[in-house]
Image (cartoon, grey):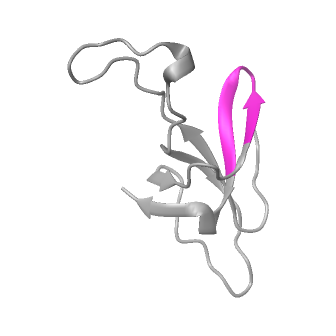
């Protein structure tokens, strides 16, 4: 498994919506990149900046934040704690 370093967080993004509220199906080419996910692993933090998120938290992160990685056919996102906007 991936162990983030410093103030990095491993997030598993939520699946993009496949259908609108009115029932219209959204094609893959028109889906928006999700901005919400579940924290899978957390780094130890920095000396002067402790980690505020913990494993299992649902978070909202910036639209263009982080680096996408794929491990065993699962997509993850590695983001800095400062790129996380809110904990749900």
Q: Is 1 in front, or is 74? A: 74
**For residue 75: magenta?**
yes
What is the quadrant of residue 42 in the picture? bottom right
> Which residue is rendered at x = 40% and y = 25% of the image?
17
User: How many numbered marks appear?
Assistant: 0
The magenta span reads: 68-78
| In the image, farthest residue toward the bottom | 48
Residue 22 belongs to the span the image colors magenta: no
Q: Position of residue 85 (x, y in %)?
A: 49, 63
Quarter of the figure that contains the N terminus = top right
Residue 65 position, x and y percent, is 65, 53
Whether residue 77 is situated above or below residue 24 in the rendered picture: below
Q: Main secondary structure of the magenta part?
A: strand
The residue shown at (66%, 37%) is 76
Q: Does residue 43 lie above or below 70 as drawn? A: below
Q: Give x and y (percent) for residue 88.
A: 36, 55
Residue at 50% over, 25% down? 31
Against 80, residue 60 (above or below) is: above
> Left or right: where does residue 31 sit relative to residue 1?
left
**Residue 2 x %, y %:** 76, 43
Furthest residue to the left? 22
Q: Residue at x 48, y 27 (%)?
A: 15
Instruction: Name the residue nearer the viewer: 14 or 23.
Output: 23
């Amino acid at each position: 498994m991936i162990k983030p370093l410093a103030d990095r967080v491993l997030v598993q993004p939520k699946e993009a919506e496949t259908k609108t509220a009115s029932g219209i199906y959204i094609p893959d080419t028109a889906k928006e990149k999700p901005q919400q996910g579940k924290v899978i692993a957390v780094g130890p933090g920095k000396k002067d900046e402790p980690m505020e998120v913990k494993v299992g938290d649902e978070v909202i992160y910036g639209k263009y934040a982080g680096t996408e990685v794929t491990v065993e056919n699962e997509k993850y996102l590695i983001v800095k704690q400062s790129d996380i906007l809110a904990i749900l």
